[in-house]
Image: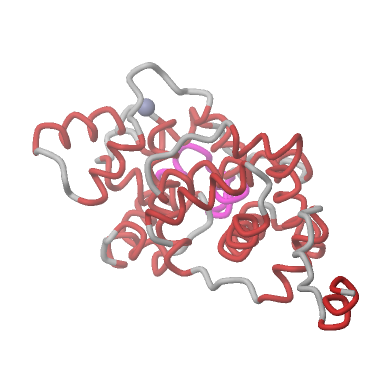
Amino acid sequence: MAVRTIFSMAEECARAERSGWHDFVRDYAPVARTLLIHYFPSLSPDIEQHVIGVFARAYANGCEWFRQLRFQNEREFAMSFRELVFAYGRSVARLPKPEISLDQFSEVVKDLPVVERQLLWLFVKGYNAQQIAPMMMNAEATANAVKEIADNRLAEVLPEASSAAFTVSARALMESAEQTKGEQCLALRTYNNLVNGQITWRERELAEQHMSDCFYCLDRYTGYQEMIRINKDREPLGEADVERVLRAVGVEPAEKKKGLFARLLAKS
Ligand SMILES: [Zn+2]
């Protein structure tokens, strides 16, 4: 969606206008679906209902979610939407029992460079090397090599754990990482500059230095890269499905054009 239209869409949505909600559902229902299935697989059997649940939250209280929303571009909008989806998923899907803690993960990645930590965090999030490569603009080979290092380290830290321990623990690790947010944490604008390469060498160094010590930014920055990829890959929802979601959420139906008969009656 062009920069111009994401802002007007959000304004229309804040006023509960159908045109905005139509585009929002068309473009973002597939994103909600992708995120819910990936991070909350137990919701998969009733996924269509849960997608509606996400949009119902944004529509609740006179579209309050949109009225308090602030963003600079579609990437930032997508990050807010991601938070909305996660808040929904966390409230309805039971948290799987983690096998490793953030402290143990920290032990696994100690002394690994920041890029390798990012790769590994994306593995934790359940992506494979093939999926991670385009997210990070990195070769698959690097991703696989890092995964191997991590598996070996995991075996040292937690001898009884399997490689699946990372993914099983993903949700809990992400929640722990979110709680480590501090005052020095990077702004979304900095993430954007990093992704676009519009950053001085010195600024990049500072940002990466911070990220190598901060699980909050590690999680959020990889989430940022992930959302860019999910948005690029999304296929707009079909018209009939858009209508179905709008109806379920309670968006006002489109006004029917008056037929010839009604117009004749009005004249007489
Ligand atoms: Zn941080």
Look at the image and tell me whether residue 42 can be seen.
no
Residue closer to the observer: 244 or 180: 244
Question: Residue 157 lies in magenta, yes or no?
Answer: yes
Residue at the far top in the pictured view: 183
Q: Nearer the viewer, residue 72 or 154?
A: 72
Tell me where residue 221 appears, x and y as whole percent.
Answer: 38, 42
Rendered position, 231 above or below 265: above
The x and y percentages for residue 119 are 36, 51
Q: Name which quarter of the figure residue 169 lies in.
A: top right
Q: Is residue 173 left or right of residue 255?
A: left
Stretch of the chain drawn in magenta: 152-168
> Left or right: where does residue 124 sit relative to residue 13?
left
Residue occupying image coordinates x 39% and y 33%: 217
Q: Tell me: residue 164, above or below residue 15.
A: below
Residue at horizontal 54 percent and vertical 35 percent from the top = 69
Q: Residue furthest front?
A: 268
- Residue 190: image location, x then y, percent: 27, 36
* Residue at 46% over, 61% down: 231
Q: Is residue 215 visible?
A: yes
Image quadrant assignment for residue 91: top right
* Residue 46 as seen in the image, left or right of residue 89: right
